[in-house]
Amino acid sequence: MHLHRYEKWWLTFGIGSLVLFLVIVGISAFHQGHQPPSSVKTINYEQIDKVAPFNEPGLRKVEGKDWDYELVVVASAFMYMPTEVEIPVGSTVKIIATTKDVVHGYGVAGTNINMMLEPGYVNEYVTTMDKTGEYLVVCNEYCGTGHHTMKMMYKVVDINE
Ligand code: CUA
């Protein structure tokens, strides 16, 4: 089989790019640990009301960790617990969220926080809230007739004011 010179260059370029990108993805995933953040911890979703920390949803100050607060959120049709939290501006918050029943979303408007809450799994995300204001949290996975009413509010406040 005869291949034109340019065709050989093109094939070399194509296969070379493929190998290069696979190597980059491999290094990123396995060496640098860039993996999807969710669905790592599991939980029995029927026992959520009895299992810590989900038996007490809310924002709690923590000591000796890489974050200042832990925000425990329980989603269910068609609400979030808690419904509103006040977060001091500049603090680092670990969101720990799960759902009691069906799949719900957890999108915080104006930020890059966007999680899919699945029954039986715990989602965690660490973020720093560095701008004051109100952030609406909405469910962005269709979960039933009350889907559009499902919301929560972050109030990021300057406690020195
Ligand atoms: Cu919960 Cu849509």
Image (cartoon, helix red, strand yellow):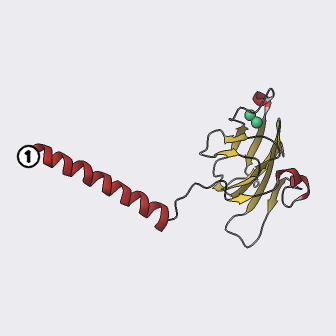
Q: Quadrant of residue 147?
A: top right
Q: Is residue 36 left or right of residue 68?
A: left
Q: Please say whether residue 157 is visible from this viewpoint.
A: yes
- Judge left or right: residue 22 versus residue 13: right
For disc 1, the neighbor class at 10 Å (few under 14, some 14 to 19, many from 20) is few
Residue 117 spot, x, y in % from top left: 71, 46
Circle 1 is placed at which residue position? 5
In-front residue for pair 161/142 = 142
Look at 70% across and 57% down and name the residue there.
93
Q: Where in the figure is residue 15, as x and y percent of width and height?
A: 26, 51
**Foreground: 24 or 67?**
24
Image spot of residue 4 (x, y percent): 8, 43
Where is 38 relative to 83, above or below?
below
Q: Quadrant of ligand 1?
A: top right
Q: Is residue 138 above or below residue 113?
A: above
Q: Quadrant of the N terminus?
A: top left
Q: Is residue 54 left or right of residue 3?
A: right
Badge 1 marks a residue whose secondary structure is helix
- Residue 152 lies, with reference to residue 126, above or below; the image says above
Say which quarter of the image contains residue 75: top right
Task: Residue at 80%, 63% (x, y): give it.
Answer: 61
In percent of width and height, residue 39 lies at: 67, 54
Q: Residue furthest front?
A: 1
Residue 161 seen anywhere in this rendered image of the structure: no
User: Could you tell me how many numbered marks the image carries?
Assistant: 1
**Residue at the image position 73 percent from the left and 73 percent from the top:** 64
Q: Amino acid at mark 1?
A: Arg
